[in-house]
Image (cartoon, rainbow, N blue to C red):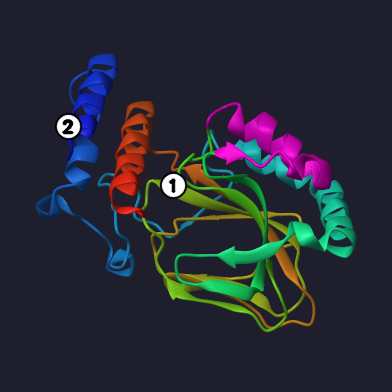
């Protein structure tokens, strides 16, 4: 902890009440770590959140409207994405994952580095509008992370790994899904259904693959875990931002 974090935490507790960020404090205490074996490689595990790899996309009142909005807009989203892929290929880039940079894993970002990528509004207007109206304006996206179209080219795979923490949750909007694609989270593998969403806790070990003959594209959103509180979200944003400032990567 740094003086900056201590002061920020004090202000948050004054605003929300004593004990409002106890789970964040516990996350920083190795003696209080309580993690599932398949979360062993995650860096930060905040206690008290559901230890389940897969979530029903419709089960959380905070997330359900987001799911329904993206699913309703799927046809337009897929059409605009296809147009961008065919005629605006320079908008895509090799995805920079902390594991590596993969040329067979392409990304088009809508939100990155704490802010919307405004250039994407003209390229994929439907997805950008839904993200803005249903996610960003209501502070549902974890600002420490991002939202992007994730395209795995034929033959591409994402190696098994745990993401950094459990206090955000990953929503996949299945945009363009050929046969032969799948994802494993913990011990269960699933396939995407085009036009539908998957929701999972990516602090659990997971991997993905495209064994088909055409690109697989999902729109990924790093949402706040719905079981976190506003006080915790404020504290976690301060904490991770300061850690990144100090060491360059959280």
Mark 1 surroundings within 10 Å by alpha-carbon count, few (fewer than 14), some (14 through 19), many (20 or more): many
Compared to residue 147, the image places residue 187 above or below, namely below
Residue on which the image places disc 1? 168
Tag 2's secondary structure? helix
Query: Which of disc 2 and disc 1 is earlier in sequence?
Result: 2
| 53 on left or right of 126 | left
Tell me where the magenta segment starts and ends, as one range. Answer: 115-139
User: What number is the disc on residue 3?
Assistant: 2
**Closer-to-camera residue (184/167):** 167
In the picture, which quadrant includes the N terminus? top left
Q: Is residue 132 visible?
A: yes
Image coords of residue 119 (percent x, y): 74, 42
> Quick check: 217 above or below 50?
below
Vertical position of residue 176 compared to residue 188: above or below: above
Q: Is residue 130 above or below residue 15?
A: below
Q: Position of residue 144 (x, y in %)?
A: 45, 43
- Which SS class for mark 1? strand
Please say whether residue 29 is one of the residues in the magenta stretch.
no
Q: CA distance from mark 1 to mark 2?
A: 26 Å
Q: How many marks?
A: 2
Residue 192 can be seen, yes or no = no
Q: Where is residue 81, by image quadrant? A: bottom right
């Amino acid at each position: 902890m740094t003086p900056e974090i201590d002061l920020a935490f004090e202000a948050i507790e004054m605003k929300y009440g004593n004990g409002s960020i106890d789970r964040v404090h516990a996350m920083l205490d190795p003696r209080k770590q309580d993690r599932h074996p398949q979360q062993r490689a995650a860096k930060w595990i905040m206690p008290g959140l559901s230890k389940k790899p897969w979530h029903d996309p419709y089960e959380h009142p905070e997330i359900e409207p987001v799911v329904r909005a993206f699913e309703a807009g799927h046809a337009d989203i897929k059409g605009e994405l296809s147009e961008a892929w065919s005629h605006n290929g320079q908008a895509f880039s090799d995805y920079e994952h902390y594991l590596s940079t993969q040329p067979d894993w392409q990304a088009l970002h809508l939100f990155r580095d704490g802010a919307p990528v405004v250039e994407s509004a003209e390229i994929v207007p439907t997805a950008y509008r839904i993200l803005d109206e249903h996610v960003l304006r209501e502070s549902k996206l974890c600002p420490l992370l991002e939202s992007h179209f994730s395209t795995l080219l034929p033959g591409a795979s994402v190696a098994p790994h745990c993401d950094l923490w459990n206090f955000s949750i990953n929503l996949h909007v299945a945009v363009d899904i050929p046969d032969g694609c799948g994802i494993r989270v913990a011990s269960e593998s699933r396939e995407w259904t085009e036009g539908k969403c998957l929701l999972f806790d990516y602090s659990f070990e997971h991997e993905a693959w495209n064994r088909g003959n055409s690109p697989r594209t999902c729109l990924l959103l790093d949402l706040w875990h719905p079981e976190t509180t506003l006080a915790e979200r404020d504290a976690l944003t301060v904490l991770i931002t300061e850690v990144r400032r100090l060491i360059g990567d959280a």
